[in-house]
Amino acid sequence: MGKGRRMKKQGPPPPLDESKVTRKRKDAPPAPVEAPVKKRRTEVKAPKKNAAKPAAKANGTAENPRSKPRPTKKFVPPPPSDDEDEFSDLSADEELVDGVNVTGLDALGSASESEDLEDLEADEFGDSDDVMDSDEEGVKKTGMWSDDDDEDDIEEKLTAANIEGLSRKLDMQRAIEDAEAAAELEEAQMQTNIVGDKPKVLDDDEDEEGRPITNLATQDLQLLRTRLSDTIRVLDDFKNLAEEGRSRAEYRAQLLKDICAYYGYSEFLAEKLLGLFPPREAFAFFEANETPRPIVIRTNTLRSHRRELAQSLINRGVQLEPVGKWSKVGLQIFDSQVPLGATPEYLAGHYILQAASSFLPVMALAPQEHERVLDMTAAPGGKTTHIAALMKNTGCVFANDASKDRSKGLIGNIHRLGVKNTVVCNYSALEFPTVMGGFDRVLLDAPCSGTGVIAKDASVKTNKTEQDFMKLPHLQKQLVLAAIDSVDHASKTGGYIVYSTCSVTLEENEQVVQYALNKRPNVKLVETGLVFGKEGFTKIGGKIFHPSMKMTRRYYPHTYNVDGFFVAKFKKFGPTPAGAVLAGGVSAANKAGNAAGKDAKDGLVETEVVNNKPIRDEDDEEESDFGGWDEDEDNVYMERAERALARRKGKNPKANPRDAKVVTVGREKVESSPKAAKVEAKVESSPKVAKVEVKVVSSPKTAKDKAKKSAAVETPAPAKEAARATKTKVNGGGAEGASEKKKSGRKAKA
Ligand SMILES: C[S@@+](CC[C@H](N)C(=O)[O-])C[C@H]1O[C@@H](n2cnc3c(N)ncnc32)[C@H](O)[C@@H]1O
C-alpha cells in the first residue's frame, strides 16, 4: 500500500473505551479460573433483561462516580499461543474475518442490547483476541501480528469491524445513559421546580428539609449535584428558565460555588477551568477528571512489534486492544492478571507504560532518521524513547532534563528500551542554544501545572496558586524561545519545534505560543499532522490570539478520554533576529556564529565560544550519575585523536594541533588563528555552564582576514604567547566560580 492509503486509514479515533476498563479492587472476588480453551468462542450469550446500568456521564445528570462502583469484569484466561492449535484457531477466525461482521466485537455491538452487561463483558473478554485486529499473513506464518499494515487488508477489515463493533456498543451504552439521564433530569426537575419549569437554584438557603445550604456539600452530594445540573440547564436556556430579575452572572457564580464544593477545587482553579468551556461542557470536563483514563502501553518498535507483544501479553492474561487507528504502537489495557511493570516483556523493553496523549507531541514532531533532535525536558523519557524508536536508533537525540534525579529514570528507560542514539544531558533548558544548537527538531514538553491530568493527581485541584500561573508561564515562555533558537532554520529535513503541555489553561498554552510568535518573527505555526484534537483558541474570554492558533491542538479527558494535553508545532524559517534576546538573557547579536562574517563591517566581531563540557558539582565529580569525568584521561584521548586526524590530513602530527582552533557555534564555523594578536577572551561562569566569549577585533574585511592581518602586522608571536596575552575575566564567585575559572582558563588558553 502506498502512502496515500496509509493516510486514508487515519481518522479521528473512537474514544478510548473506558467502559471496558476494570479497576482492580482489593475486595473483588478472585477471578474465576477456567480451563484454557483451545477454540475461541464466536458466540455471544443471549442478552438478558435489566442490564446493570452504566454510569451516566457528561449530560448534566451523570451519577456520581464516587457513589457507584463500576461493574467488575470477569476474566477468562486466553488459550496458550505457543501451540499449533492456536494458529489453527486463528485461521478459523480468518474465515470469519472475510465476512467482517462476525467478529467478537461485531457481536458485541448487538450484545450491548443484552440485559446483563457483566455477562456481556465476560464474553467480551473471553473473546478478547477477537477484539484485536488480526493479520492474515502474519497469522498464517507466525500466529503473531505485524506492525506493517501496508500488507494486510484483513487487518484493516478486522480493525474496522472492531471499531464498528465498539462504537455500536458505545452507542447502545449512550442510549441507555441518555434514557437514564432523562429520567434523572425529570426527577430532579420535579424536586426543584417551584414555579413552573423554572428550577430554583439561587439563594437556596435551605434545602427542602430545611437544612442550611452551606452544609449541603457535606450532607447531601446528590442534592448538590441536582442543583449543579439545574444551574447548567438554566444557563443553557437562560431566556426560558432563569428566574425573573436574575442575571447570568449570578447563575454562573452559583455554578462555580457548587463545582468547588462538589469536586473539591479551589475557587481560583475552578474559575480558570470553567472559563474554558460552555457550562455543560465544563461539567463534563470536571466529571471526567473524577475517573482515571485507560491504561495504555506503547510498543517499543526497537525491540518488538505490536502484534507480537499483544500476543505475548494475552498469553499472560492481559486483556488488550489496539488503542485506535491513529496509533500503530499503542495498546489499551482492559484488564491484567499480571503487574504490567514487571512482565518479562516489560523488563526486556518491549513496551513502556505511557498515556495515549503522550504519543501526540512525538507524532507531531515526526522525527526523521539521521536527524539531530533535542528533547529539552526529557525525563523520565517516555517521549525521548519514542523519538529514538521513530528514528530507528539513527541520527542523534539529545535528551536533556534539569533534574538529576528524574534523569536517572530517563537513563533507565533508555537502557531498558535499547535506545542507542541518545545522549543524556543535565542542563537547564534555558541554557540552550548556548550549550548546543543547530538541531533539526526540538521537542519542548514543558513543565506545567498538570491541569490536564487531574484524574491522576487530584492535588492539582487545590495546590495551584495564582503565583504558579505566573511563574510557570514565565518559564514556559523562556523555554519556548530557547527551543526555537536551538533549531537550525536551514535544516534540510526539519526546522521544527513542538511545544506541548499536559495542561489545558490558556496561560500555559495559547498565551505561550502567542508570546513565541510575537518574539520570534522567524517562526510560524504549522499543522501538527495529528488526526484528531480540538483546535486551539483564537478568541476566548476577551483574549484574541493569532488566527493560525487554530492549527494547535487541544485534548480533553471528556472528549477523547485521554489526558488533557496541548500540542503546537512551529516551523522556523529564518535565523534568530539580531535584536532578539535569547532565553538565557544573551543578545542574539552576541552570538558569535551569526556575527562572524556578517557583522564584521563595523570592525568588531564578537565570537562566543561555547564550553560544551557538562558542568557538575565539585563534590560529586568522581561519583557522578553520568559516569564521572576524568579530564586528564580525556586529554590523552583528545590529543591522540587530534594527532591521528593530523596524520590523516597529511600534516605533521607533532605540531601542536591546538595551536589553531575552530570554534563551532550552531552550524557556522569561525576560524580564529592562534596568531591573531588581539584576541580578548571574556569568560562568564554560571552555576552550570562556562561560557567563553572571544572578541576578535576585525579588519574591515572578515574576522578571518583580520586575524591573519593582525598576525602578520602586530604579533608574529607563537600561539602560546598569544594565548598568554589573552585577557581572561571571570565573573561569578565562590568555589564554583574559582573552579570555573580553572576550567575556563584552560578553554581560553586553547
Ligand atoms: C512534563 S515533564 C517531561 C516529561 C517527558 N517529556 C516525558 O515524556 O517523559 C517536564 C520535565 O521538565 C523538567 N524541567 C523543569 N524545568 C526545567 C528546565 N528549566 N530545564 C530542563 N528541564 C526542566 C522537569 O524535571 C521534568 O522532568
Image: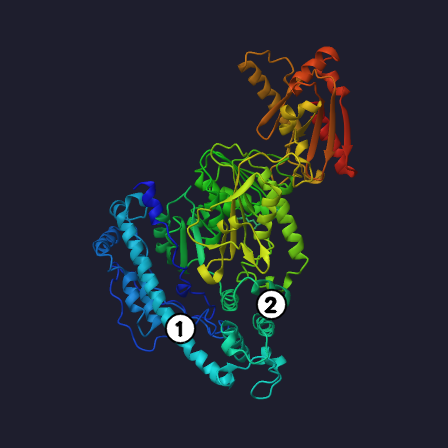
Nearer-the-camera pick, 121 or 110: 110
Choose between 581 and 427: the one closer to the eye. Answer: 581
Q: Compare marks 2 and 1 and give the one earlier in the sequence.
A: 1
The location of residue 356, given as percent across then percent down, is 46, 54
**SS of the residue at dot 1?**
helix
Q: Who is closer to the viewer here, 381 or 169? A: 169
Which residue is located at x 77 percent, y 35 percent? 731
Name the residue located 45 percent from the left edge and 65 percent from the top edge. Answer: 24
Circle 1: residue type? Asp
> How far, Cα to Cα, is label 2 from label 1?
27 Å
Q: Amino acid at mark 2?
A: Tyr
Q: The C terminus lies in which quarter of the figure? A: top right
Estimate how packed mark 2 is, as few (under 14), some (14 to 19) or many (20 or more) residues with alpha carbons within 10 Å: many
Q: Which residue is tagged 2?
A: 265
Total number of numbered discs in the rendering: 2
Q: Is residue 272 visible?
A: yes
Q: Which residue is mark 1?
A: 178
Horizontal relation, residue 327 to residue 425: left or right: left
Q: Quadrant of residue 174?
A: bottom left
Q: Position of residue 471 (x, y in %)?
A: 67, 53
